[in-house]
Image (cartoon, helix red, strand yellow):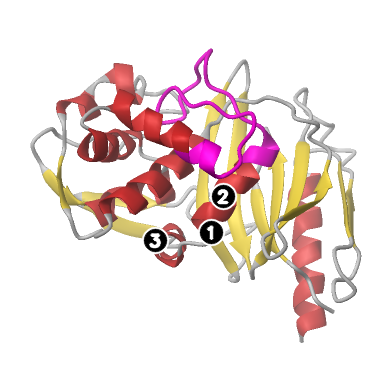
Amino acid sequence: MVFRRSFFLLLSLFIIASSFGSLCVCADETAETSTIIVDAVSKENPPPSTVNTVVVRNVDSGRNIFNNSKGKVIQPGVAAKLMTALVAYESIGQTSAKVVIPAEAEKDGYIGAVGQVSAPRLGLKSGSILSARDLIQAVLVCSANDACVSLAVYVSGSPESFVKLMNQKAEELGCENTHFSNCTGLNSATSHTTAEDIALIAEAVFLKNELVTLASEPKATVGESKIHSKNYLTSTSLISNYYMKEAKGLIAGQTENGEIQRQFVDAVFHHIVFVPCHLSIYFLSKCRF
């Protein structure tokens, strides 16, 4: 049964990776972990102009067991939203806390312009009240920028002050080449991270059971809004080809820097972080045969 499940997991990876170009992953972490080789090359879909960078991290051992990133610097994108959810969750404590939506959550300067692919929003109105739990879920399930800003203001009084906490947390997690300039992941000349650092941030979120539970819902109701996950592995609302019932989603979203770049972070079973950047980010488990 475990063999069959692992086989279909790897087959799914092949299909997912082949849709994004060429990818080869090889991992041999322990005697109990079989070598995993995924060699996915799609002749019909040539490699995109932006080359994938890949990090595979074992959460149990805290080791990267595959890494071709070489410290390549990229825009944070969903990594900023993951960090926002993590810092807010740890700072607030009780997710039942009531949050008054601030005026900043309606300003394009903080949440991005309408129609911008990296600026999804719920359409929150200042003065309305939502629970911290609902806002965190909105960040993780649909990458809502106005939810990010609302949490930031609630915790620190302003988005700018909250960003300082994000950078402090990144340093605490051991991120060596990450700097956030906003809490939403909007592109900025002063924001940057790497696949290695994203794996560390995602690992920290993955270890918070409540955050994983909130992130894994394919749809939810936040205030008066019905939200649906953009995560291909946990939801069929956008596309059904890649759905996996074992997947525990952390976040999905898009950034734009000359071209649209999709980003995903998922947990399938547990233990292994699989991070291909620029197009997608996935969490995978240690496969035991």
- For the N terminus, the image quarter is bottom right
Identify the residue shown where x is 54% and y is 28%. 255
Which is the main secondary structure of the residues drawn in magenta? Answer: loop
Q: Is residue 279 visible?
A: no
Q: What segment carries the magenta color?
A: 169-197
Give the percent coordinates (x, y) of residue 73.
68, 24
The alpha-carbon separation of the residues under discs 2 and 1 comes to: 6 Å
Residue positioned most to the bottom: 1
Is residue 141 shown left or right of residue 274?
Answer: left
126, 163: nearer the viewer: 163
* Disc 2 and disc 1 in contact, CB within 8 angstroms: yes
Q: Secondary structure at mark 2?
A: helix
Q: Earlier in the sequence, mark 3 or mark 2?
A: 2
The alpha-carbon separation of the residues under discs 3 and 2 comes to: 14 Å
Q: Secondary structure at mark 3?
A: helix
Residue positioned most to the left: 127
